Image (spheres, rainbow, N blue to C red):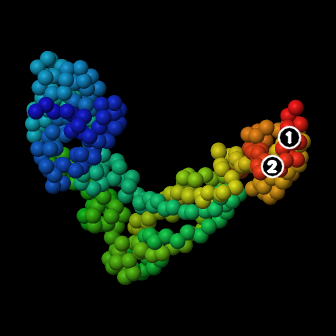
Amino acid sequence: MAKDYYQVLGVTKNANQDEIKKAYYKLAHQHHPNKGGDEAKMKEVNEAYGVLGNQEKRKQYDQYGQTFEQAKSQGGFGGFNGFNDFSDFAQAFRGQGGGQQSQNFSFDMGDLGDIFGDLFGGGSRRGSRQSARGRDIEAELTIDFNDAVFGTEKELTLKKDVACDKCKGSGAEPGSKTSTCSTCQGTGQVVQNIGFGIGFPSTCPDCQGAGKKADKNCTKCHGKGTVNTTQKINVKIPAGIDNGQSIRMSGYGQASGKGTQAGDLYLRIKVLPDIRFRRVGYDLKSRKEISFTQAALGDKVDIETIDGVVKLKIPEGTQSGKVFRIRNKGVNHLHGRSRGDLLIEVIVKTPIRLNRKQKKLLEELEK
């Protein structure tokens, strides 16, 4: 049966190269034999990415058809036969002979370090960055419409890992000595062999990247450097924030201990609707019903704004649907000093259940 490489990677035919690469990373993490995956499926994924991950081969594949064999038979792939086993896979990256040449696979060593960092925990680049800080947290906070317009302060309660207050996050019992980690010799990293003569640095499992170990672990956090607890956080909501926007609070995420920096808190804001106003950008929209007489003769009417009631002059002859603008009665600009406007749509109420006298007057007015 013909293979559809796009289907193998789970992407559409109009996917860009970054989307194809991300799809390959995900599938490699899922199917790699060293992670307990299916070796046959991994080879199929490698074959698909070997074509679609290379722009030149992808063009030829799209031109000649879906089957890899068809493309090869018409000379489309310049001798690329896929990876027969994982020694070929490794040799291609090392630029050695083996089954294939490295030029036939569109990875660089940075890509390889990243993917094996995902597969085996800690990587050449990504792992070192992640080990230096805790995980980020996402949370949601619901606020009133007025609070979004003018800003406010809220108290948020989170259950998360924080630095142990007894050992100050070091993981060592106060007063105990620390010594260089014998596993990593103080570097904080060890080389993890993935086979094929390839090794990648990963965080030391004994000292968690600190490079030092306590002679006696902290009795409260048991050497972890963090404890899980409920923490109350004061959050300043800026004026002008909109529904669905997020606030980033640096250092309020999960703590990872051992002297590393805590992650960040991403707070998604949910704004409750207001029956009086509809927000459009930094402007507010509202409606005001007026009588037929007010529209015809003109009047001054009370308008409810976010700041309170103001007077609006209705000129004579105003038509239903006319929109009036009241300056600076909208939403505060986020991190700015100016404000939006209030847009009032006038709705003229048509009189109903008229008596004979009223009908006669309207008929005379029409004449």
Residue lying at the far top in this picture: please name it: 74
| In-front residue for pair 103/95 | 103
Element type at mark 1: helix
* Residue 29 locus on image (x, y percent): 24, 49
Residue 184, image quadrant = bottom left
Q: Quadrant of the C terminus?
A: top right
Position of 366 relative to 142 (above/below): above
Q: Which residue is drawn at 42% across and 61% down?
A: 134
In this view, which residue lies farthest toward the front?
356
Mark 1–mark 2 Cα distance, whole angstroms, equals: 10 Å
The residue that mark 2 highlights is 354
Task: Report crowding for label 2: few under 14, some 14 to 19, many 20 or more residues within 10 A (C-alpha).
Answer: few
Residue name at image x 85 percent, y 38 percent: 363
Q: In the rendered image, is residue 347 in sight?
A: yes
* Whole-percent x, y for residue 41 in the image: 14, 44
Q: Which quadrant: the N terminus? A: top left
Percent of width and height locating residue 52: 25, 31
Q: Quadrant of residue 36?
A: bottom left
Q: Which of 217 and 41 is in front in this view?
A: 41
Is residue 250 in view?
A: no
Q: Can you identify the residue that label 1 sits on?
A: 362
Residue 299, given in percent of the width and then of the height, sits at 89, 46
Is residue 30 left or right of 220 when viewed as pictured?
A: left
Which amino acid type is marked by label 1? Leu
Report how many numbered discs are placed on residues in the image.
2
Q: Which amino acid does label 2 sit on?
A: Leu
Residue located 53% across and 59% down the image: 267
Q: Of marks 1 and 2, which one's residue comes earlier in the chain?
A: 2
